[in-house]
Image: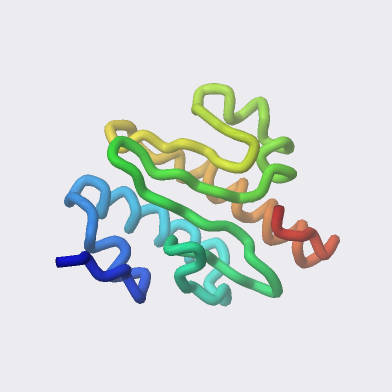
Amino acid sequence: MTKQKPQTIEEYVSQFPLETQRTLDALLTCLTEVVPEAEKELKWGAPAFTYRRILFTVAAFKKHVNFYPTPATINVFNEELKPFSTTKSAIQLKLNEPLPLKLIREIASHRLKDVVENDAKWM
């Protein structure tokens, strides 16, 4: 029997172990607080926040959650992100460590401001 793909963010979150669900819930809540007017939906099978265009997405894995705020946004926060594993487009947040909620809020706020003021693109 084939497992059905999630159709909602709630279904996406619920498919993971409890520890992962808690981290995802905390991250999604934090991002919602920064951009309450954003539309939240699945894109590429993972939660995405859209306001005028895609702001950021998140995705869960076995031992971490990735936060994707765009490469340009990650570059702005290079110094603050040194303690974290990053790629060109993702910030890896380990499940066994507290979420850096203050930093996540700053990054999300910067991305929103960049979209609103500069019409910044997605990737």
Query: Among all residues in the image, which is located at the extreme front?
Result: 1
The quarter holding residue 1 reads: bottom left
- x and y percent of residue 59 in the render? 42, 52
Establish if 86 lies above or below 38.
Answer: above
Establish if 83 lies above or below 1.
Answer: above
The quarter holding residue 114 reads: bottom right
Q: On the rendered structure, is 98 left or right of 89?
A: left
Q: On the rendered structure, is 118 left or right of 97?
A: right
- x and y percent of residue 66 in the render? 46, 44
Q: Nearer the viewer, residue 25 or 42?
A: 42
- x and y percent of residue 77 in the render? 67, 35
Query: Among all residues in the image, which is located at the extreme right?
Result: 118
Query: Among all residues in the image, which is located at the extreme left?
Result: 1
Residue name at image x 41 percent, y 53 percent: 27
How many numbered marks appear? 0
Residue name at image x 64 percent, y 36 percent: 88
Establish if 69 lies above or below 42.
Answer: above
Residue name at image x 58 percent, y 23 percent: 82
| Colour scheme shown | rainbow
- x and y percent of residue 112 in the render? 68, 61
Residue name at image x 66 percent, y 39 percent: 74
Query: Among all residues in the image, which is located at the extreme top?
Result: 83
Q: On the rendered structure, is 27 left or right of 110?
A: left
